[in-house]
Amino acid sequence: MFDKQDIVAVVFERNYKTQHLQIQIVPVPKKCSKALRSSFINAARLKNIEMVSMGADQEIWDMVNEG
């Protein structure tokens, strides 16, 4: 779906004090995706946040601890 439009889906969780997740999915032109990835990583680094990439074969439950 996105490939035909030459875009990628950028998915992130909005971190705000609520009782539910706020997952955002934003379409971005493919040509901007590498710059966007490094921008996220740099912004996280400035706030001492570790970013972890998931492989295509991984599930979110493989990455997080329950509780």
Image (tube, rainbow, N blue to C red):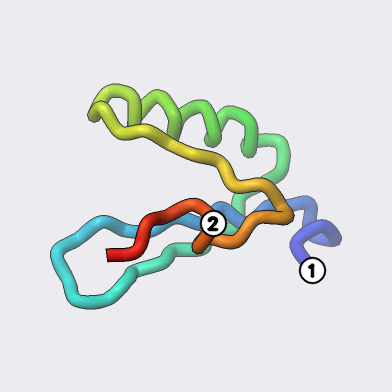
Is 30 located above or below residue 27 in the figure? above
Q: Position of residue 52 (x, y in %)?
A: 49, 39
- Residue 42 is drawn in which quadrant? top left
Q: Position of residue 63 (x, y in %)?
A: 49, 52
Label 1: few (<14), some (14–19) or many (≥20) C-alpha neighbours in 10 Å: few
Q: Which residue is farthest left?
A: 17
Residue 50 as seen in the image, left or right of residue 3: left
The numbered disc on residue 50 is none
* Residue closest to the eye, 58 or 23: 58
- Residue 46 is drawn in which quadrant? top left
Question: Sequence order check: which comes first, mark 1 or mark 2?
Answer: 1
State the quadrant of the C terminus.
bottom left
State the quadrant of the N terminus.
bottom right
Q: Which residue is farthest front?
A: 66
Name the residue located 65 percent from the left edge and 55 percent from the top edge: 58
- Residue 49 is drawn in which quadrant? top left
Which residue corresponds to mark 2?
Answer: 62
Residue 45 as seen in the image, left or right of residue 55: left
The three-letter code of the residue at mark 2 reads Asp
Q: Which element type, helix, strand or loop, lies under badge 1?
A: loop
* Residue closest to the eye, 58 or 1: 58
Name the residue located 63 percent from the left edge and 31 percent from the top edge: 34
Name the residue located 34 percent from the left edge and 69 percent from the top edge: 22
Residue 32 as seen in the image, left or right of residue 2: left
Q: Which element type, helix, strand or loop, lies under badge 2?
A: helix
Residue 39 as seen in the image, left or right of residue 56: left
The three-letter code of the residue at mark 1 reads Met
Cα distance between the residues tagged 1 and 2: 27 Å
Which residue corresponds to mark 1?
Answer: 1
Discs 1, 2 touching: Cβ within 8 Å: no
Is 12 located above or below residue 34 in the figure? below
Q: Position of residue 6 (x, y in %)?
A: 78, 51
